[in-house]
Image (cartoon, rainbow, N blue to C red):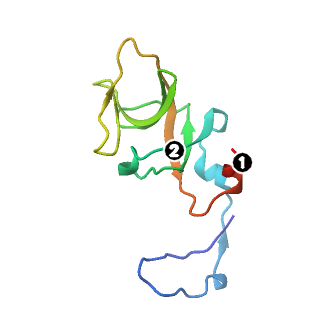
């Protein structure tokens, strides 16, 4: 992957030519974004409940099933047949939103609940992706 060493600051009006100075890194986006390929899946965020941690509607979520869940992690879980993306509070058995307009969700003993994985990365597409639109 070729990387242009360019820092973009908000409010500037131009850049010096990035073509004059670039170097190549020996990695791919897969290597950069995915730690455990055989235990990783990709999902898409829906809704506004995780905006406080920078996850917005339509963002791509990279979810790792191999990572040990810790309190405060952003997770994808199956709660009573519905996939949800929430912060987990393991001590109080709560699923928390990162948006004040959403209430915490307690995980009760009678709930069907399974953690599908930890969100290790999220990606925002600033233009529509043909690949994602086909899904």
Residue 90 found in image quarter: top left
Out of 124 and 65, give the one closest to the viewer. 124
Decide: is 131 above or below 71: below
Please report the residue visible at 69 percent of the width from the left and 64 percent of the height from the top: 1
Say left or right for 114 vs 43: left
Please report the residue visible at 35 percent of the width from the left and 17 percent of the height from the top: 108
Residue 23 found in image quarter: bottom right
Out of 92 and 37, give the one closest to the viewer. 92
Tally of numbered tags? 2
Q: Earlier in the sequence, mark 2 or mark 1?
A: 2
Out of 2 and 97, give the one closest to the viewer. 97
Q: Position of residue 19 (x, y in %)?
A: 66, 83
Q: Position of residue 122 (x, y in %)?
A: 52, 49
Q: Residues within 10 Å of mark 1 (few under 14, many from 20)?
A: few
Badge nearest the viewer, 2 or 1: 1
Query: In what element is the residue under mark 2?
Result: loop
Q: CA distance from mark 2 to mark 1?
A: 16 Å
Decide: is 110 above or below 72: above
Q: Residues within 10 Å of mark 2 (few under 14, many from 20)?
A: some
Q: Position of residue 73 (x, y in %)?
A: 40, 37
Out of 84 and 31, give the one closest to the viewer. 84
Q: Which residue is mark 1?
A: 134
Please report the residue visible at 34 percent of the width from the left and 44 percent of the height from the top: 98
Please report the residue visible at 29 percent of the width from the left and 35 percent of the height from the top: 103
Query: In what element is the residue under mark 1?
Result: loop
Q: Which mark is residue 45?
A: 2
Mark 2 and mark 1 residues within 8 Å of each other at the beta carbon: no
Q: Which mark is residue 4?
A: none
Say left or right for 71 vs 30: left
Q: Position of residue 126 (x, y in %)?
A: 56, 63
Q: Quadrant of the C terminus?
A: top right
């Amino acid at each position: 992957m070729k990387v242009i060493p360019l820092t973009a600051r908000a409010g500037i009006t131009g850049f010096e030519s990035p073509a004059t100075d670039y170097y190549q890194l020996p990695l791919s986006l897969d290597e950069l974004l995915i730690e455990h390929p055989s235990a990783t899946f990709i999902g898409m965020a829906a809704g506004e409940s995780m905006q406080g941690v920078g996850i917005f509607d339509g963002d791509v979520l990279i979810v790792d099933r191999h990572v040990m869940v810790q309190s405060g992690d952003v997770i994808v879980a199956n709660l009573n047949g519905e996939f949800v993306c929430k912060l987990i509070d393991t001590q109080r058995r709560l699923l928390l939103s990162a948006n004040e307009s959403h209430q915490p969700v307690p995980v009760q003993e009678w709930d069907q609940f399974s953690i599908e994985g930890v969100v290790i990365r999220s990606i925002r597409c600033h233009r529509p992706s043909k690949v994602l639109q086909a899904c």
